[in-house]
Amino acid sequence: MTKREFGKKCVWYHVDGISESNLATLRRKFDLHSAIISELKTPTIRPRVEVIEENIYMVIHFPVYRKKVGSVFPAELDFIIAKNTLITLTYGNMPSISRFVKEFEKGRSDWLTSRTPAHLVYQILRHLVENTLAQLGHVQEDIDHIESLIFNQRAKEVIPKLTSEIRNIINFKQSLAPHDSILQSLKVALKEMFGARISPYFNEIEGMQLKASSEVQNALDIIRLLQQTNDSLLSNHTNEVIKILTLVTVVTLPVTLIATLYGMNVDGLPFLGAFPDPIPLYLILLVMTGLTLLLYIFFRDRKWF
């Protein structure tokens, strides 16, 4: 657990990874309600904001994009907000929070002097939403790459990439979907604790969040259109292959039929016995070739291939 002080009105404690020792320290140092301690023991699926005694307890999820593996997963961040104290907790590595700490200590820590934990919450959420928008830029790069593959006649290679990207965008959407209601509830709770002057800061966050949600929906619409395009190209390719196989079958059908007839041990077949060998063989081959050429000319004239 790390501690950072910003004047007398704002002390920030950050816990990176929940453990029994960390929970015991939090319980002892801050006298937190047992309901909060119980919630902190395991990750929470459902985001929410609750006022418990003199603390605001918030659970929120942000998408984390791993470019090396090309996957997105939700990362949970918990806030415990008191009048002069902010506690943030993560379950495992959340790179955006680590970057925030470094960037904030370099250039923006003086901004919090004589301010409240609510202002620090604003800065953290603003950074996380900005990070989400940056990650959506990587998603757009992946979509552009998939589009390039599709229109370069590499549709088969696209299928696993499409599936992975759709999953990533859905994970983005699931992580961001509850944010509107969470931010509204948080703004109401902070207004009661710190006064109305804090509200404009979170109005800005709501605007940024709306932009992120809109970009996720646009990305989902685009990837679905690309999926439909890829399906159409694959279907068209399959139809072309089936058409060619069908034409080959039809063209060779008369030849197969003649060969079958002359393979039967019966009397009375044309050419047999009427000419000395091997003239009947040449005549039969000539008939086969002629029928094949006639069918080929017929199909080509109809523009069937």
Image: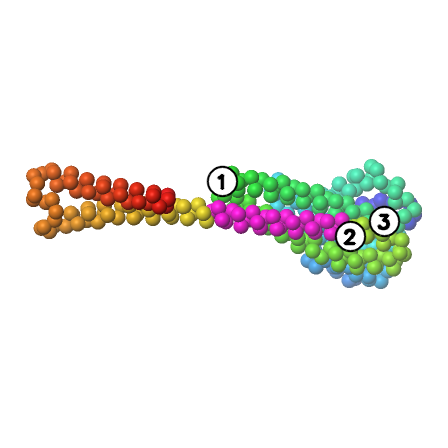
Residue 206, numbered label: 2
Position of residue 29 measured from the top left corner of the image (x, y, whole percent): 84, 54
Q: Residue at x 67, y 45 (%)?
A: 136
Label 1 vs label 3, nearer the camera: 1
Lateral position of residue 190 relative to residue 76, left or right: right
Real-space Cα separation, disc 2 to disc 1, in angstroms: 42 Å
Q: Residue at x 83, y 39 (%)?
A: 105
Q: Secondary structure at mark 3?
A: helix
Q: Nearer the viewer, residue 170 or 149?
A: 149
Residue 161: quarter of image: top right
Contact between marks 2 and 3 (CB within 8 A): the answer is no
Q: Which residue matches tag 1?
A: 153
Residue type of the residue flagged with mark 3: His
Real-space Cα separation, disc 1 to disc 3, in angstroms: 52 Å
Residue type of the residue flagged with mark 1: Gln
Range drawn in magenta: 207-234
Position of residue 199 measured from the top left corner of the image (x, y, whole percent): 85, 54
- Number of other residues with Cα within 10 Å of mark 3, as a class: few under 14, some 14 to 19, many 20 or more: some
Residue 176, numbered label: none
Position of residue 126 measured from the top left corner of the image (x, y, whole percent): 78, 47
Label 2 vs label 1, nearer the camera: 1
Residue 222 counted in the magenta span: yes
Real-space Cα separation, disc 2 to disc 3, in angstroms: 15 Å
- Number of other residues with Cα within 10 Å of mark 1, as a class: few under 14, some 14 to 19, many 20 or more: few
Secondary structure character of the magenta stretch overall:
helix
Q: Which residue matches tag 3?
A: 119
Q: Residue at x 23, y 40 (%)?
A: 289
